Amino acid sequence: MLKTSIEKAAQPDVITIAKGILKGYIKNTNIFILKMLLRFIGIRKKINKNIPNDINRLLALVIAMYFSLRKRFEKDQALAMVKAVIIPIGIISQMSLFRYVEDTDHSFENLKKYSKCFKKEGPMRLNRMTIEEESPETYRFTVHNCLFKSVFNSFSCPELLGVFCAVDNATYSIYSPDSIVFSRGGTDNTIAKNNKTCIFICTNKGHSNER
């Protein structure tokens, strides 16, 4: 029996997952994780105290991992490794918010329903989101600000913002790939790419078959 439900989302063990992935890339993983967690504690204290604890922990973990990897690797390689770790973790976390296991009807209607819940739970809840179009064929919404951007900028690592855009791209693309197509409406339609907003467009390509 599941210990989770639609009302109670899963809480993945992020540190264990991160350690498992990093173990495939670096030597002395336990020592690396220990040093990273010490850096994580210091970074948490520097992040704006008005940010909720769960988001504070997430951002501090990503920054601590990146800075720790920068001690061992060149910038590009460190960033690539952060992506290799955080994108899978992000997908797992987003799928828990979509109740992917608890609600196996991975329909267009459910994608819309759980996406709207992001306004109340998950890392995106502090951002301002507006629904631009909602129909049986299309669900389009816009994120007008990004808390992550201000935090990453304050630590002089704006390049980390794109990692989370990649998580969103992947999650929405694999939620129901046979019936739902996700796009940004262009290659630069994210705040990470210096656009003013982030665009999310979900198209129900199975709608014609439902008629």
Image: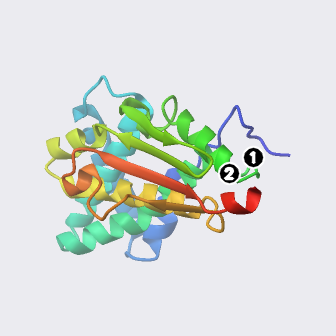
For residue 61, above or below residue 207: above
- Disc 1 is placed on an element classified as loop
The amino acid type, in three-letter code, at marker 2 is Tyr
- Disc 2 is placed on an element classified as loop
The residue shown at (23%, 40%) is 151
The extreme right residue here reads 1
The residue shown at (54%, 35%) is 116
Q: Position of residue 113 (x, y in %)?
A: 62, 38
Seen from the viewer's position, the closer of residues 23 and 63 is 63
For residue 164, above or below residue 147: below
Report whether 68 appears left or right of 28.
left
Are dots 2 and 1 in contact, CB under 8 Å?
A: yes
Seen from the viewer's position, the closer of residues 179 and 164 is 179
Instruction: Report which residue position mark 2 lands on.
Output: 100
Residue 187 numbered tag? none
Instruction: Report which residue position mark 1 lands on.
Output: 103
The residue shown at (68%, 34%) is 8
